[in-house]
Image (spheres, rainbow, N blue to C red):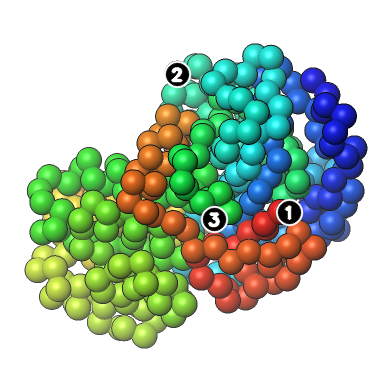
Amino acid sequence: MATDGTLPSKQKAAQFHPKDQTVHINEVPIPSIKPDELLVKVRAASLCHSDLMLFEPNEQGLNLGSGEPFTMVYTPTASPRLSLINPQGHEGCGTVLEVGSQAQGFTKGDRVGWLPIVDCCFECEACQVHNLYCETGQSKVQGMTVDGYFQTYCAVKWQNAAKIPDGMDLDSSAPIFCAGATAYNSVEATHSELKGTPSDMFVAVIGCGGLGHLGIQYLKAHGYNVIGIDLSPDALEEAKAQGADHVFNPSKDKDYVQQIRSITGKGCHAAINFTNSAPAYASTPDVIRYNGVLMVTGIPQKPIQFSGMDVSMLRIRVRGANNGRTDQLRRCLEFSHKHGIKPHVTQFKLEEFQSMLDTMHEGKHKGRMGVLFD
């Protein structure tokens, strides 16, 4: 399906060039949608530390394209230049302009956000866990190997899209569609493991930046006491602003484990690790009480290890969470709107993309950063 003729034929896009490892603002065609797609005018798209992997070697076996330029999007991994950071996903939101003939449940004018996995079947057993592992073996991540969302118009699979509730701010919602979904799923998985009254329980959030500051909000909405742990003073300041009851910087608070045990009695009932740091994971059991939950959300470039004895003897219960499926995304949106959960977003123009990247490289930001389109 082609555009209806009222749109320009070209648009600007921030594109990563694998050959010279840089980002250029290029002019590219506006996409024509397939029958199972929506054409969306992007209002906002978010950036995360995972985008830095485009400029640095990674050890996750991720293929960053065939050498041709592709439009960037916010994608989950991590940068070895930073110590405590947040794994997050691909994020964008906007307004539906066209609806493919096979798309279901959407009309022109709907405000939507979406998940980024394409070329999956959405139906197999693996897709019910995560579309990245579709049994077809053809799954691709928009912004990694195919075009993403740092462009004014993009094509979105209708199965990935979810409507944004009325009254929810569109301009600041982009981070919800991976960072928020990942944080929400991590908190919900933790909540399902904990038996007791949340106000009597403590959860540590390790990595309080782009993902963690949302995790803190979801935990507080459930009523938990939250302890924020991060190496960045800015991230800890943001953690306190979002309701963390206590915060610690392990590089300065050398006795932070003892302080946490003093505050909690026997240690935290759970810890959600949003970082890409293997050392941070190695120290996470220190702040958890016996039979506490260790939620693996961040993905370090180095392998993480846990004691087989600790896992077998239930010293810790290791669980995992990610950005999930579209049905979980809808629940995340409903919960976020009900409880007034909102990302802290610093926004740039598309032409300021390099400045945004530089700021992220330097770690001089709070919450999320992204592009706000006209």
The label on residue 125 is: 2
Q: Is residue 72 left or right of residue 116?
A: right
Q: Residues within 10 Å of mark 3 (few under 14, many from 20)?
A: many
The label on residue 8 is: none
Whether 138 is drawn above or below 293: the answer is above
Q: Residues within 10 Å of mark 2 (few under 14, many from 20)?
A: few
Q: Residues within 10 Å of mark 1 (few under 14, many from 20)?
A: few
Q: Secondary structure at mark 2?
A: loop
Pick the front one: 159 or 228: 159
Q: Tell me which label, 2 or 3, sits earlier in the chain.
A: 2
Spatial separation of the CA atoms under disc 1 and disc 2? 40 Å
Name which residue lies at 56% across and 30% down.
160
Q: Tell me which label, 1 or 2, sits earlier in the chain.
A: 2
Name which residue lies at 74% across and 21% down.
34
Spatial separation of the CA atoms under disc 2 and disc 3? 34 Å
* Amino acid type for the residue under numbered disc 2: Glu
x and y percent of residue 261 in the render? Answer: 16, 71
Image-quadrant location for residue 267? bottom left
The label on residue 374 is: 1
The label on residue 172 is: 3
Mark yes or no: residue 288 visible: no
